[in-house]
Image (spheres, grey):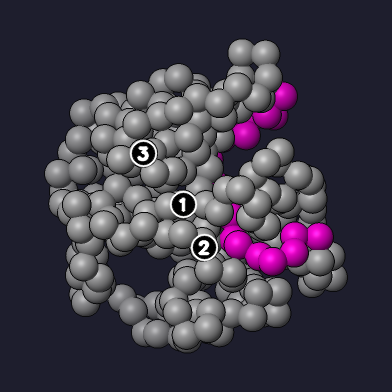
C-alpha cells in the first residue's frame, strides 16, 4: 500500500473523466478496476463521482454537458498538475502561448483550478490543493501510474512545459523514436513522444496510464465490458507491457504492467 498525503508540486496529481454517458461509464470503470464510487451532487440531476479504491480517492468522473455533446466533443480524460498558485501559473502559461479554457476558479472546499490549451495543442489543468490534494494512492494496481504527451510539435511542447513548470527533459532512444522523460526535482513525472503520420489525424493529447498487474487479463476484461482494445498488449523492453483501450463512450486510456516499479495489489 502506498498512500499519498499530498501531491508533489510540478507533478500530475489528479485525473478526471468527462463522459458522454456518465452512468454507463461508471459501470464500466468500476467493474474493470474494482473501484467503488461516491456520487457528489453538483447540480440538478448532475453528479461529480469520486472513484475510489479501498475508500481512497483515485480519480473522478462526471456527465458531459449537452452543449459539449452538440459540439461533438468526445469523452475524454483530463490530467491535473499540482501547483502552489493557480493564478500566477495561469498568467505564466498565457505568456508562454497557452489559452485559458476555463478558470481560474475555486472548487468549493477542495481547491482552485484552471484548464489550459497548451501551444502544442493538448489540454490539461492545474490544481492548487485545498482540502482535496488529489489521487491518494500510487504504485498500486488500478490507480494512475503515468502521463504521456502525444505532441505534433515536441520541441514546442518541451519548451512550454519546461519553462512553465521547471521540468527537465531527458531524451531517450526508444523503439525507433525519440522519447522524452520529463522530471521535476529529480523525479520522473511524465513522458512525451512526437506524433507521426501513423496517428491518422488524431489531435495532440495527454494519455493516462493505469498500473495493472496483468495487462493481457485487463485488456480482455475491458473488451468483455464493451471497451475496444485499439493497441493490443505490447512489450516495451525494460519498461513493461501496455495496451491502449477505448471505453464504450469513446474515452481513451492505457494500462501498464510495469517492469520498472514494484506494483502492489
- Looking at the picture, how far across and down is residue 208, in whole percent? 44, 53
Horizontal side of residue 62 vs 25, given as left or right = right
- Looking at the picture, how far across and down is residue 73, in whole percent? 62, 34
Q: Which residue is mark 1?
A: 135
The answer to which quarter of the image holds residue 88 is: bottom right
User: Looking at this view, is 192 or 12 the one in front?
Assistant: 12
Q: Are marks 1 and 2 in contact (CB under 8 Å)?
A: yes
- Looking at the picture, how far across and down is residue 200, in whole percent? 49, 52
- Label 1 vs 3, first from the N-terminus: 3
Q: Secondary structure at mark 1?
A: loop
The answer to which quarter of the image holds residue 34 is: top left
- Looking at the picture, how far across and down is residue 161, in whole percent? 64, 73
Would residue 69 be counted in the magenta stretch? yes
Q: Secondary structure at mark 3?
A: loop
The answer to which quarter of the image holds residue 11 is: bottom right
Residue at screen point 50% across, 77% down: 182
Q: Is residue 163 above or below residue 220?
A: below
Badge count:
3
- Label 1 vs 2, first from the N-terminus: 2
Within-10-Å neighbours for mark 1: few <14, some 14–19, many 20+: many
Residue range in magenta is: 67-87
Q: Is residue 224 visible?
A: yes
Would residue 4 be counted in the magenta stretch? no
Q: Secondary structure at mark 2?
A: loop
Q: Which residue is mark 2?
A: 7
* Mark 1 → mark 3, Cα distance in angstroms: 12 Å
Which numbered mark, 1 or 3, is in the foreground of this view? 3
Within-10-Å neighbours for mark 3: few <14, some 14–19, many 20+: few
Q: Is residue 17 above or below residue 157?
A: above
User: Looking at this view, is 138 or 102 the one in front?
Assistant: 138
Q: Residue furthest top?
A: 45
Q: Which residue is mark 3?
A: 55
Amino acid at each position: 500500500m502506498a498512500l499519498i498525503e499530498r501531491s508533489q508540486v510540478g507533478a500530475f496529481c489528479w485525473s478526471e473523466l468527462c463522459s458522454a454517458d456518465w452512468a454507463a461509464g461508471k459501470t464500466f470503470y468500476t467493474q474493470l478496476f474494482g473501484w467503488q464510487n461516491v456520487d457528489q451532487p453538483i447540480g440538478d440531476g448532475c453528479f461529480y463521482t469520486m472513484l475510489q479504491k479501498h475508500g481512497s480517492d483515485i480519480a473522478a468522473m462526471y456527465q458531459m454537458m449537452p452543449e459539449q455533446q452538440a459540439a461533438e466533443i468526445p469523452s475524454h480524460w483530463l490530467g491535473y498538475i499540482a501547483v502552489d498558485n493557480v493564478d500566477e501559473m495561469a498568467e505564466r502559461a498565457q505568456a508562454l502561448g497557452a489559452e485559458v479554457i476555463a478558470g481560474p476558479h475555486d472548487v468549493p472546499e477542495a481547491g482552485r483550478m484552471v484548464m489550459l490549451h497548451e501551444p502544442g495543442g493538448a489540454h490539461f489543468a492545474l490544481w492548487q490543493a485545498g482540502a482535496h490534494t488529489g489521487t491518494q494512492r500510487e504504485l498500486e494496481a488500478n490507480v494512475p501510474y503515468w502521463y504521456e504527451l502525444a505532441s505534433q510539435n515536441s520541441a514546442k511542447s518541451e519548451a512550454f512545459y519546461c519553462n512553465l513548470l521547471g521540468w527537465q527533459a531527458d531524451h531517450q532512444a526508444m523503439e525507433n523514436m525519440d522519447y522524452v522523460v520529463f522530471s521535476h526535482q529529480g523525479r520522473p513525472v511524465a513522458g512525451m513522444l512526437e506524433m507521426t503520420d501513423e496517428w491518422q489525424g488524431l489531435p495532440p493529447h495527454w494519455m493516462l496510464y493505469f498500473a495493472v498487474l496483468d495487462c493481457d487479463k485487463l485488456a480482455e476484461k475491458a473488451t468483455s465490458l464493451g471497451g475496444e482494445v485499439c493497441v493490443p498488449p505490447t512489450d516495451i523492453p525494460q519498461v513493461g507491457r501496455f495496451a491502449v483501450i477505448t471505453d464504450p463512450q469513446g474515452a481513451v486510456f492505457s494500462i501498464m504492467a510495469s517492469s520498472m516499479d514494484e506494483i502492489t495489489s
